[in-house]
Amino acid sequence: MGRRRVQHELISKESVRKVTFKKRRAGLKKKLSELTTLCGVTACAIICASFDHQPEIWPSPAEAVRVLDKFNNFPIKRRDMNNFDCLEDLKDLDHLLKEKIKVIADKIECEMGLKSIPANTDGHNIRPTKGG
């Protein structure tokens, strides 16, 4: 017989909430340990609770810094144009495309002699190239 589905909501009684937190935190650390051992991946956890003075860092602060540095140094991957996770991603893409279209339109106008050499967003002049 399977387990019944648990309703996920804030536990109203603070003492029960703290006990549940401590048990689940231990379970999370155990699962992270298993994941890193069985799958050969690096992982860390920073767990903050409002009732603890310091966040708990697993496996150690030094290892967490190493993992976070590795994460921050990953090259930014180009997005698959068909894979957007949320509205914010689409808004960011819309803004980027509008900026690029404006730069291209300015270059075309400049090339046709309709406009002076446009300034780039960083303040540098954009010079059209010959033949292209």
Image (cartoon, rainbow, N blue to C red):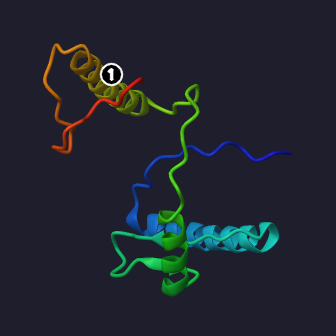
Which quadrant of the figure has residue 101? Answer: top left
Q: Nearer the viewer, residue 79 or 120?
A: 120
Q: Position of residue 99 (x, y in %)?
A: 29, 28
Where is residue 15 shown, x and y percent of the image? 42, 69
Seen in the picture, residue 45 relative to 86 is either above or below; the reply is below
Q: In the rendered view of the protein, which quadrant contains the N terminus? A: top right
Vertical placement of residue 46 versus 1, above or below:
below
- What is the quadrant of the C terminus in the image? top left
Residue 117 seen:
yes
In the figure, residue 7 lies in which quadrant?
Answer: top right
| Residue sitting nearer the eye, 68 or 21 | 68
Q: Residue at x 54, y 41 (%)?
A: 78
Tell me if residue 45 can be seen. Answer: no
Tell me which amino acid carries mark 1.
Answer: Ile
Crowding at label 1, few (<14), some or many (≥20) Cα neighbours within 10 Å? few
Q: Residue furthest front?
A: 130
Q: Position of residue 2 (x, y in %)?
A: 81, 45
Q: Nearer the viewer, residue 102 or 23?
A: 102
- Residue at 55 percent of width and 28 percent of height: 81
Residue at 33% over, 81% down: 53
- Relative to 113, 131 lies left or right: right
Near-viewer residue (13 or 33): 33
* 38 left or right of 100 in image: right
Q: Is residue 116 left or right of residue 14?
A: left
Q: Secondary structure at mark 1?
A: helix
Q: What is the number of callouts on the image?
A: 1
Position of residue 79 relative to residue 53, above or below, is above
Residue located beneath label 1 in the image: 101
Residue at figure coordinates x 33%, y 28% from the top left: 100
